[in-house]
Image: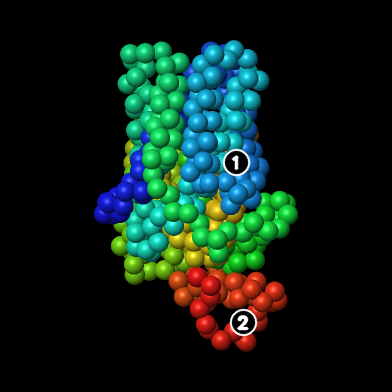
Amino acid sequence: MLSVLRNRTYRQLFTAQVVALVGTGLATVALGLLAYDIAGADAGSVLGTALAIKMGAYVAIAPMIGAMADRLPRRTLLAGADLTRAAVALILPFVDQVWQVYVLIFLLQSASAAFTPTFQAVIPDVLPAERDYTQALSLSRLAYDLESLFSPALAAALLSLISYNWLFLGTVAGFLASAVLVVAGVLPKPSAARESRTGTRHAKATAGTRLFFTTPPLRSLLALNLAVAAASATVTVNSVVYVRDHLGLGVADVSLALGAYGGGSMLVALLLPRVLERVSDRTVMLRGALLLAAVFAALGAVTGAGGGGWRWPTLLAVWAAFGAACSMVLTPTGRLIRRSAPPEQRASAFAAQFSLSHSCWMLTYPLAGWLGAAAGLQSAVIVLGLITLASGMLAVHLWPSLASTEPEYTELHAARTHLAEANGRRCPAAGWTGQSGPE
């Protein structure tokens, strides 16, 4: 898997991603402590609102950036987003009002909504070979999982030496380092044939979303996003409730539970490059979604049990299984989008995926919290488990095996599209002779 790092441009971009993720992790810890300093006992509501603002920025801003991506140099867009995030992180330690936190969080997450989809759309051009790109996706998944484990530990170590305000300087350093690495890299430039500069701004902003609703595998991905969001929300929101209240364990065990989730995800990310050489994306992703539904059934058994020492190791196994199944769905997502979207719509497609997937989290995060608090954990497991099962079954229905999105299918689709555009008319599938397109 590490052989892909021999590519100098990708190595710089991957390093930029890692240092930015570490900076983001430090900011997450520092933000919680800042909220407590400002709001005291109401810090939870402040953070909850900040999370809602974060998701709102992701959902609203990403499609707009996707619409403008072809008009801006990608290096400028990526570096500008990093510099914006660094500037916001530099200001955060000096705020003393809750509304100021909300404004800065919106700016910070808007910049992230510009950076992440653009970064994701660049990688297929940097690594055009299917095998290399698959390895890059697995490395990216590992980076996210390792950040969730490493950043809190690093923050805890730093907080034993410095005050939390200094953590924001670590965030600033991470984003500045990311900007330097992006600027230093030689990013491939989209060819004129791949650029799409026509159409209204609204049409371009919604192009990726429309592509999702008209392409069978991407329609299925919408349902898969909801299944993953239901499972990850259960882990993120209710881990502390399961460990502290349901099982009566200590604070350190919460980290262990979250570590089990990350461990399951990392294990699958390591294994998938070889698996995907023999098994289709469809098979892996759909089985991952259906596995999530089965894991919810196991979680229901743990939740409904009255007692017993077996519940804690079983919960760890359930959390690890959640992580593994989520990784089965998430890791091949970039391959699916690359194969399903014409090259000139790739940036819009990645932006749409970023926006639509976070729309699912906007639904499941509060649902997991409210149901768990108001109706109990078992009710939350049942409702979210049913959502996951229904989403998985819908994904199977929406993604027929014939629409397997193999490379030949993508090239055929792209050639038809380009030929139709060149002729100024719709190109019927039955009448297409099979000549190669403009690429």
The quarter of the image holding the N terminus is bottom left
Q: Amino acid at mark 1?
A: Tyr
- Name above or below for residue 314 compared with residue 399: above
Q: Image quarter for residue 50? A: top right
Q: In the shown orientation, is residue 71 left or right of residue 5?
A: right
Question: Disc count in the image?
Answer: 2
Of residues 153 and 313, the one nearer the viewer is 153
- Name above or below for residue 237 compared with residue 388: above
Q: In the shown orientation, is residue 396 left or right of residue 159?
A: right
Q: In the shown orientation, is residue 58 left or right of residue 339?
A: right
Q: Which mark is residue 58?
A: 1
Of residues 187 and 139, the one nearer the viewer is 187
Q: Secondary structure at mark 2?
A: helix
- Name above or below for residue 290 compared with residue 63: below
Residue on which disc 2 sits: 429
Q: Nearer the viewer, mark 2 or mark 1?
A: 2
Q: Amino acid at mark 2?
A: Ala
Q: Image quarter for residue 58? A: top right
